[in-house]
Image (tube, rainbow, N blue to C red):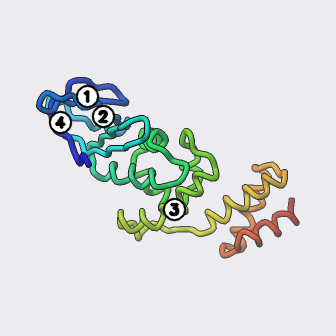
Amino acid sequence: MIAHIQGKLVEKSPTEVVIDCNGVGYHINISLHTFSLLPNADFIKLFTHLQIKEDAHSLFGFVEKSERELFKLLLSVSGIGASIARSMLSSLDPKQIIHAIGNGDVGTIQSLKGIGPKTAQRVILDLREKVLKIYDLNEISVPQHNINREESLSALEVLGYVRKNAEKVVDKIIKENPEAGVETIIKQALKNL
């Protein structure tokens, strides 16, 4: 609905700005990444995303169009709302998030505040193909065993095994048989734990 706002920067903090546009002050939520890119000029332009909820209309602003598009992609994942998406973009550079999704790096995604193991896996499953197409990341190797490794480790933890011990065994199995599926990894791990 509102694609961008251009005007005089009236207030600025690491999480929000107010831009005066012809006498109307727009309160816009921003990430730390956008805050670090704000120019030292009085007049600025931010690409925006308007989120309409039952109890609030929130405007999110970004210096770069690519960050706005990544924000929208993150919002499309079940379990990720605007505050978690903004927190993700504040914790890591958008390129780091894109590479983590493209590489299936569950650990990096899970290290972000508000993201648990299941949500991290969902982010990668839902967004990997889109990220690879949109950002033209053909050169990123997409090791399938990364997801198989994480799912295997999660299953072994549920079965009561200590993650550090399970990681050693699972990594050895994957090294010997990179094509092993989750079921194979778990069965072999259970024999060695």
**Residue at 40% across / 45% down in the picture?**
93
Q: Which residue is mark 4?
A: 44
**Residue 90 position by quadrant:** top left
Residue type at the position of mark 1: Val
Residue type at the position of mark 4: Ile
Contact? badges 1 and 2 (CB < 8 Å):
yes
Q: Earlier in the sequence, mark 3 or mark 2?
A: 2
**Residue at 39% across / 35% down in the picture?**
56
Most foreground residue, 80 or 40: 80
Instruction: Work out whether 60 lies above or below 26.
Output: below
Q: Dot 2: few (<14), some (14–19), or many (≥20) neighbours within 10 Å?
A: many
Under circle 4, the secondary element is: strand
**Residue 140 position by quadrant:** bottom left
User: Disc 3 and disc 4: Cα gap in Å?
Assistant: 34 Å
User: Disc 1 and disc 3: Cα gap in Å?
Assistant: 34 Å
Q: Which residue is mark 2?
A: 28
Estimate the x, y position of residue 105 in percent, counting from the top left: 55, 56
Q: Which residue is mark 1?
A: 18
Q: Which residue is mark 3?
A: 126
Q: Earlier in the sequence, mark 3 or mark 4?
A: 4
**Residue at 63% across / 67% down in the picture?**
145
Under circle 1, the secondary element is: strand
